[in-house]
Image: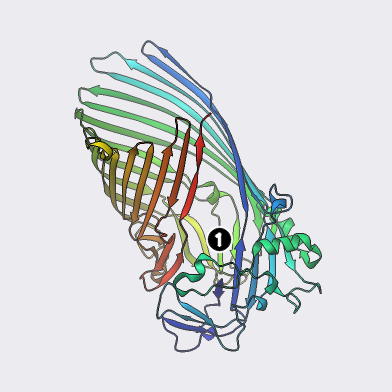
Amino acid sequence: MLLGTTANVANFRPGYTSYFQEVLPNANSSSAITLSTDDKSGRTFQFVPSVKHRFAGLEIDYGASFSNSQTYYDYAPSGRHFQSRPKATITYRLPGVGFTIDRRESLKWPKIAPTAGAPDFYNLDNYGTLIVTQPDREGEDEIVTAKLNLKKTIDLAVPAFVKAGGVFRQQERHLQNRSRRYNYVGPDGVQNSPDDNLAQFLDRTPKWTDSNAGYRPPPWANPFAVARHQALLPNLWREDVPFGVNARAAGERGITEQVTAGYVMGNVKIESFSILAGVRAEQTKTDADGPVQLANGTVIGRQSRSGDYVDLFPGVHFRYAPTRNFVSRLSYSNGIGRPSFDALIPLDTVNDAAMTVNTRNAALRPQYSDNFDATAEYYFEPVGMVSASVFLKEVNDFIFTDSSQLVPAGPNNGFGGLYENYRITTMRNGGSARYRGFELAYQQQFTFLPGFWRGLGFSANYTQLSTKGDYGGASATTLVAGFVPKAANVAVTYLGRGLNLRLNAVWRGTYLVGSSATPALLRYSEPKLQINLKTRYTVSSRIAIFCDIENLNKSPITETYFVTTDRPAETRIVVAKVVAGITGRF
């Protein structure tokens, strides 16, 4: 349930505080509920032939690969699984609500209550504007590669070789959307009339979240029942035909990326010391196309974007291993981080309930990095290792999510005069950034213990880093969003007697989630501890039984806040995920 109103002082009762607010009933306040169901299916096939030749002092290998993947989200009657059980995304809305938000007992789980005289948003029959959306979507990825490598051993006083080669990779992605939408009009054929009776769709099944911290559940409708009602009684629904036509046009998107690369490298080993150095050249070409949309989402044409850039990536790596138990490494490399396809394919999305505009930045550039790493590893008997490493990464044009801008007022605001004060979210390139830190790791299998205990194992690692970024004035902080300053991982394992057990605890510290030019809107994630259990029992050489439990401790998947923990932004709770089954080889 999304309760909202516009950020206008007149919409709030005077005397509000950070812990108690009352939203007065007004034309811009509403309660909106969205529920989704879907079938997701897919298939992938690959063909990967390769050949290797060995001659005196020379190795040649070459190969190619082809893969094709398709994913489907089947909602509509034309979908592959629809007839077994109709599914849909449903939304319903109640305008003009008034409510109080009481955080005095719990910041994350406030008590929310409708105000006297305002519509009760806990009563499903008060709602209207019931909409069924069947976004039958699919995507296809096709990847073709070809590669050639030659390695020549050089007859010198010390072992040495030179290696050269090249690779071509092309990836094509095509997206389609055959969405359909229906408005519930009821027996009288008029939407939002007294005969709508949305209470007939009330879902009385208890939900796990309904009892969380005294949380009062919203009036859940049963999305399966609503979808079935539309399929069996289409005369009580009116299809939004323009929506379907526009959805098809907006959903037709695609991108092609071609990367052609060549490299040369050489290695020389002088007793316990070796040097590996080389350089790689890459040319990247991208062509993307998508819809041109007005601010209301109407498609009025097509747009294309192209990119073409060439880069050089040098690298040098030193390795020193004076004994069979100790290895140290020192390296420098230069890398590239290309924007995701999803960030480049043109598309704008407007969410009126959340007052946001999400827009793709087709001009987004890759980010480049200079990487410096130093590592020391010590191996001990019978099976164990301890390591320490330090790293430094200098990044240019780093990519970040920018939510610092609001849609301005006026007819020339870039959105046809609409969406004033909606928050714009998009991906942008920053200036330069620096990441530096260290990692410690330890792992050991206790095979030296007697009997049952020799199957025990233990591993742990800890990473700490600091970041500093130049956002070009688009952020009130120099921290780089998305990087976790402190993280740790601990696991206890057991191997033996047909059992393969792993109990794993993953911890991460506080980190910046989203940057903003407004200091009060800097968004952070709270520390998180998640415990996972994986179990496997081998019945025979061909049959095994497994049961994996993810998030055994039911840690919230998201807990974020603005600047300080007494300003919570989002809390998302999930139940533990259990995957079990039987595997066999025949």
Pick whichever, 104 or 233, lies toward us: 233
Horizontal and vertical percent for residue 501?
37, 43
Query: Does residue 450 appear to the left or right of 336 in the view shown?
Result: left
In this rendering, the answer to whether 318 lies above or below 412 is above
> Is residue 141 visible to us here?
no
Q: Which residue is mark 1?
A: 358
Query: Does residue 163 appear to the left or right of 141 in the view shown?
Result: left
- Is label 1 in a helix, a strand or a loop? strand
Colouring mode (rainbow / by chain / secondary structure / one colour): rainbow
In this rendering, the answer to whether 442 lies above or below 554 is above
Horizontal and vertical percent for residue 82?
70, 52
Horizontal and vertical percent for residue 549?
44, 51
How crowded pointer 1 is (Cα within 10 Å; few <14, some 14-19, many 20+) is rated as some
Query: Does residue 343 appear to the left or right of 430 in the view shown?
Result: right
> Is residue 545 visible to us here?
yes
Residue type at numbered disc 1? Asn
- Residue lying at the far top in this picture: please name it: 56
Horizontal and vertical percent for residue 36?
61, 60
Pick whichever, 514 or 102, lies toward us: 102
Residue at x 50% of width, y 50% of height:
364
Quarter of the image that includes the N terminus: bottom right
The count of marks equals 1
Residue at x 46% of width, y 40% of height:
545
Residue at x 27% of width, y 23% of height:
268
In this rendering, the answer to whether 348 lies above or below 120 is above
Q: Quadrant of residue 524?
A: bottom left
Residue at x 60% of width, y 45% of height:
288
Q: Quadrant of residue 158?
A: top left
